[in-house]
Amino acid sequence: MLYCRNFFVANLRLILIAVAAVLTASCQPSGPAPEPQRARHDISLTEDGNIIEARVPNSATLESLLRRHDLPAPFTTAMIDAVRAVFNPRDLRANQSYRLTRSLDGLFREFRYQIDADRFLRVVMRGATADAAAPAFDVEVVPLPKEFELDAVVAEISKEHSSLVGSFEAEGENILLPLQLAEIFGGEIDFNSDLQRGDRIEVLFDRAIRHGEFVGYGDVRAAVITNSGKRISAIRFDGDDGKPQWYDEHGRSLKRQFLKSPLPFDPRVTSGFSYHRKHPVLGYTRAHLGVDFGAPTGTPVKAVATGVVEVAGWSGEAGRMVRIRHAGGYETAYLHLSSFGPGIRPGVRVDQGQLIGRVGASGTVTAAHLDYRIIKNGQYVNPIAEHSKMPPGEPLGADVLAAFETVRDARFGELQQRVSAAPVATPTSGGRN
């Protein structure tokens, strides 16, 4: 009897174990085995909060942006104070993306704001809650990782695309690449007036990529501009001081004493240097001792050479004017400005290419433009003619010339290989004649 009872109990246990196994198997989902417990925990961390992703509205401040998400005023104030250590809240820009993360019970966790294509602001709570008397934050500006791919492009000045920007936009590039070229060749070419139909620009450069998408440009490695049949080349190379500079194919610096223009390359010459010009406002003939560049109000005006500011203020018919003294007996004057650059005042030293003001219509004028003048040894001279007399840049030393030639040959070889392999564009009616 005891044996039968033990036998029955043993079989019952086996039956229960088998049933449990069947029920467990039937409850499992089909497909791969479940992830380990730790992986499920990592995933749940991204799901136990409320994430808001949006863009900064027009006229928003950092304070108004945070308050619109119902963050308490004392908390917002403390957060903005912490942000100021690494980022100026006044630099918040409309239409930039941001993300706010809160816990399920509404407590602040993290704020991210994309400053530009390369950086974002990150603010995280440091062991406190939103209702704490003195919340603490970890704040940092985080660089966005990106990769660089070597690329090349060819652009051509045509009837339809007569500017440097337009020629590159026709090839699918944006304004930032021709802006770099304008800086590189600023001592050799006046992009306001020197470009001619049929001119050709070849560029070897780094294209910035993030997650497979274009996000900007890196360095220009080499470039060649054929301007009115004249070949002008540029190769990036570390100079005698170890800093990267630009040199022509013979190793001579492209940096001249003067830039060929104080403006970006979109404006146009509206009036040249003349001793006999009828004044458009006063109506009588008198000398015009400079070159007028037509440009919209607010266009940046750059110092064409390093020097010391002698005048920065109102000057009668000239309106707001800046005059700079340079080496070699030169002075330059910039008339009819709408405003002065930051810190521009008499006695201040400025660098070549530094912002000194913006185009305007102050003084006796009919429309916004820049009147640009050069004084040499006390006499006004024609700026365009004087630029053509400027000596070339300094050559590289003999001790680094061989290394330069090696870099030059490699860059030009890569440029020509990529240009030759590029698809041939369909000619337009405005192409080379």
Image (cartoon, helix red, strand yellow):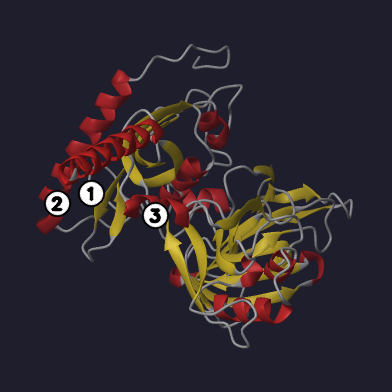
The amino acid on which the numbered mark 3 sits, given as a three-letter code, is: Asp
Q: Is residue 295 above or below residue 89?
A: above
Q: Can see residue 137?
A: yes
- Nearer-N-terminus badge (1/2): 1
Indicate the secondary structure of the residue bearing disc 3.
helix
Is there CB contact under 8 Å for labels 1 and 3?
Answer: no
Q: From mark 2 to mark 3, how far is it between C-alphas? A: 57 Å
The amino acid on which the numbered mark 1 sits, given as a three-letter code, is: Gly
Residue labelled with disc 1: 251
**Foreground residue among 76 and 406:** 76
Which label number is shown at residue 282?
A: none
Q: Looking at the image, which residue is at 66% across and 70% down? A: 90
Residue 269 lies, in percent from the top left, at 66, 43
Asked if residue 37 lies left or right of residue 136, the reply is left
Q: Can see residue 189?
A: no
Crowding at dot 1, Cα within 10 Å, few <14 / some 14-19 / many 20+, comes out as many
Q: From mark 1 to mark 3, how far is it between C-alphas? A: 57 Å
- Nearer-N-terminus badge (1/3): 3
Residue 76 lies, in percent from the top left, at 67, 76
Crowding at dot 3, Cα within 10 Å, few <14 / some 14-19 / many 20+, comes out as few
- Nearer-N-terminus badge (2/3): 3
Q: Looking at the image, which residue is at 63% across and 57% down? A: 300
Label 1 or label 3, whichever lies nearer to me, is 3
Indicate the secondary structure of the residue bearing disc 1.
loop
**Foreground residue among 129 and 97:** 129
Is there CB contact under 8 Å for labels 1 and 2?
Answer: yes
Residue labelled with disc 3: 42
Q: Looking at the image, which residue is at 66% across and 79% down? A: 75
Q: Looking at the image, which residue is at 65% across and 59% down? A: 93
Which label number is shown at residue 401?
A: 2
Residue 245: image quadrant is: bottom left
Indicate the secondary structure of the residue bearing disc 2.
helix
